[in-house]
Amino acid sequence: MSSNTTQITEDAIHATTLAWMQDRGVDLDEVAALVLYLQRDFYPDLTPEECRNHVDHVLTKREVQNAILTGIQLDRLAEEKKMDDPLLDMILRDESLYGIDEILATSILNVYGSIGMTNYGYIDRVKPGILSRLDNKSSGKIHTFLDDLVGAVAASAASRLSHNRKMEQERGAGQTTETGS
Amino acid sequence: MSSNTTQITEDAIHATTLAWMQDRGVDLDEVAALVLYLQRDFYPDLTPEECRNHVDHVLTKREVQNAILTGIQLDRLAEEKKMDDPLLDMILRDESLYGIDEILATSILNVYGSIGMTNYGYIDRVKPGILSRLDNKSSGKIHTFLDDLVGAVAASAASRLSHNRKMEQERGAGQTTETGS
Amino acid sequence: MSSNTTQITEDAIHATTLAWMQDRGVDLDEVAALVLYLQRDFYPDLTPEECRNHVDHVLTKREVQNAILTGIQLDRLAEEKKMDDPLLDMILRDESLYGIDEILATSILNVYGSIGMTNYGYIDRVKPGILSRLDNKSSGKIHTFLDDLVGAVAASAASRLSHNRKMEQERGAGQTTETGS
Amino acid sequence: MSSNTTQITEDAIHATTLAWMQDRGVDLDEVAALVLYLQRDFYPDLTPEECRNHVDHVLTKREVQNAILTGIQLDRLAEEKKMDDPLLDMILRDESLYGIDEILATSILNVYGSIGMTNYGYIDRVKPGILSRLDNKSSGKIHTFLDDLVGAVAASAASRLSHNRKMEQERGAGQTTETGS
């Protein structure tokens, strides 16, 4: 890190992150559905709207945007074969000993503390909803990074939800105050 | 970190780690069973002995020992109520927003790269075998840290197994060469 | 993690974190001075008050509080010799191969992204101001965890400051809008 | 991660990592010089050869190779402008809020435990030797990732050195036994 000059605004980085996700086939309501899948047993009154709200907030964080932009760029460059072997081969095959996709996912999870790790690991293995579709190689699309990033966003949104629910509970059922993160 | 004098040998630290685990009710064959649970679908010829071998190797690493000794000490001090609130209460209840147990578990996983994180998250949620017993609060024992540490050791052993299997495969089926880590 | 019942409020956890830090000799203005030390070359107009504001915000995060409470508890229990060897010996000597203090520090840094790691490592080695005092063993006090935690809080506050400054810059010099984290 | 078939050997991945580093101007003796810079105060008898030996061992680890190959690929693609904005702009400018370079560096450090983090942060800020050259933008080369990766390899080699020295010390000065990692 060295330059501090501002050339691209934070708002533009946020907007591009959302655009790239959509362009790669990610519907944020499907990400919210993963949050609901993870948390409905703990909060029976949970709605898709509340889940979606937390997904939207997670995506405003710069560290989350950095990971998503870098991962999607790598997926696309691999798809277009604009990389060199052996890295290209590892990413195309989602090779089992290549774990940089999990590293980028962890950088998302860490922003919301360690409690999201279990949820991330669980849905990454069970692959409900959108994660199953992204993992399907038959489309010709390469989503080696994207499936892990989407799982991490959902797990982080679940962590944020837990934090907020606890705060609300303490402040009384009538209010829906949010913590700032 | 500052002092470099050697007062306690590495061998003694290793031996104490194994003794403390046994004392808290962890049978290493049960940890090996978790590795088998995680990996048997990928390697049909996998035996409990091979899994146990990897568990034993993971436990020789100093970072792993540091995390286990610290976590078990915290469990015991909480059990004996030799801590102060609100920390005591958080650990006794395994409170959902207290994630230092997952933090220590991650320090184990990281030694074997990021590929163990998914396996860790999965068994932490599904809780097969010994993990279910450790999670059971009815015994009066506090295992807030230990269940996460055991899951992390199993997931790390699974990662080590995958690395070694790939090396063996490359070197020909007749040899069972090991990588050093 | 399992129980979701609320027994201790988030406000009480926050207040206890501040009280424990003060009780162990940490003046938050000294932590703010570390932030100023790290950032004054980049922002010539930076004041101690602005730095202190970011330190205060970092300390409202639950993950940060979890790490501080756990670390200070371990320091105190070691000081009172209420731990067992070899862990007691490692913590009393701040042994060079025992890195759980750095692990807890990292859990603080991660909340504000990876950009704080360099600042943390730098002040942990150079030990300006309060860090030098905490590192001094002659007092009879054990601060094996606390010095790393204080360094991590300062480095995290520096990261938060950088994020906010960039946002302010984009929105025009007159406003001092804050991002929420 | 899904496919387990072996197409590219581990030896080929190792060899490519070394070739890519050399191609980007990294002389491993200069990396060894960073290790000497970090550790000579603690071990007055330390030689460049012993440091180089540890650098070489760190580079045999798959997680380290994954991070280096990915980072160098990103540097090269940015240099050739084969990326899209705003990511391209962030990497070209080594933008201060873009921390994926530090994330990849951390994935290297973690393999050798948390004790390398301080050393990494220190040399990343002080920039001795090769790190100063890589950080120099006047060459037209983009080393946004490479400088952090080289610093992380040096800090990891310093950690490995500390572990090995402690083992040797315990086993008697005459032997130079190595631990396996």
Image: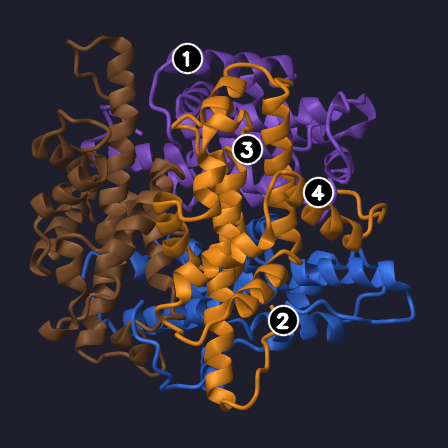
Chain colours: A brown, B orange, C purple, D blue
**Foreground residue, D14 or B152?**
B152
List x then y, in percent, for residue A86. Answer: 36, 82
Quarter of the image that includes the C terminus of chain A = top left
- Alpha carbon of mark 2 to alpha carbon of mark 1: how far? 49 Å
Q: Residue at x 42, y 46 (%)?
A: C114
- Alpha carbon of mark 4 to alpha carbon of mark 3: how far? 22 Å
Looking at the rendered structure, the secondary structure element under dot 1 is: loop
Q: Which residue is mark 2?
A: D55
Q: Residue at x 13, y 41 (%)?
A: A32
Badge 4 vs badge 1, beta-carbon distance below 8 Å: no
**Foreground residue, B114 or D57?**
B114
- Alpha carbon of mark 3 to alpha carbon of mark 2: how far? 33 Å
Q: Which residue is mark 1?
A: C8
Let me know if marks 3 and 2 both belong to one chain: no
Residue type pointed to by label 3: Tyr
When asked about the image quadrant of residue C167, the answer is top left
